[in-house]
Image (cartoon, rainbow, N blue to C red):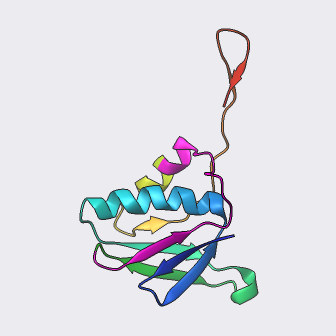
Amino acid sequence: MGKLTYDSTLGVDFDDRVLAHLQLVIGAKLRRGESFYFSWRDDPAIGDGRSTLWMHPRIPLLFKYAGGRQPSINRAWVDALMATANSPGGLVLVPEPETRVVADANGGHDA
C-alpha cells in the first residue's frame, strides 16, 4: 500500500497501482500550473465517506510506494482519470476500466 502525502500533513493510503496512475494525472495537471479538486471514496475502515483535496502547484506532494517495482500503466485508465480531472468537478478516482485483449498479427495477445 502506497501513500500520497499532501502538504506534509495529510497522508492517504492508496494501492501502488492506483497511486502510479494518480501520479501521472496529477503531475500533468500541476506541471501546467493548473489547480483542481481531487476526490475519492474513503476506505470503509475509516468511515466509508468521501474526501476531497484542493490540488495546487505550490502545495508539496509526496508519492511513496510500498513496492520496489513500477506498476504497469493502463492508458485507458489514465485517459479516464484525466477526463475527470479536466471537468469542473475535478479529478475523481474512478475504477480501472477492463483492458481489452487483442490478438496480434503473429497470433499472440496484446493487452
Quadrant of residue 64 within the rendered picture: bottom right
Return the x and y of residue 15 as percentages of the image width and height. Answer: 67, 65
Count of numbered badges drawn on the protein: 0
The quadrant in which the N terminus is found is bottom right
Q: Is residue 77 magenta?
A: yes
The magenta-colored residue range is 58-78
Return the x and y of residue 92 as percentages of the image width and height. Answer: 50, 66
**Viewer-closest of 86 and 29:** 29
Quadrant of residue 85 within the rendered picture: bottom left
**Viewer-closest of 32 and 77:** 32
Given the current orientation, which residue lies at the most extreme left position? 33
Magenta region's main secondary structure? loop
Looking at the image, residue 45 sits to the left or right of residue 96; the answer is right
What residue is drawn where x is 55% and y is 65%? 93
What residue is drawn where x is 50% and y is 50%? 78
Task: Please determine whether, in this image, residue 98 is positioned above or below residue 26.
Answer: above
Return the x and y of residue 103 as percentages of the image width and height. Answer: 69, 18
The quadrant in which the C terminus is found is top right
Determine if residue 102 is in view: yes
Looking at the image, residue 92 sits to the left or right of residue 88; the answer is right
What residue is drawn where x is 69% and y is 83%? 48
Task: Please determine whether, in this image, residue 29 is positioned above or below residue 62.
Answer: above
What residue is drawn where x is 73% and y is 11%? 107
Given the current orientation, which residue lies at the most extreme top position? 106
Q: Is residue 71 magenta?
A: yes
Quadrant of residue 6 within the rendered picture: bottom left
Determine if residue 86 is in view: no
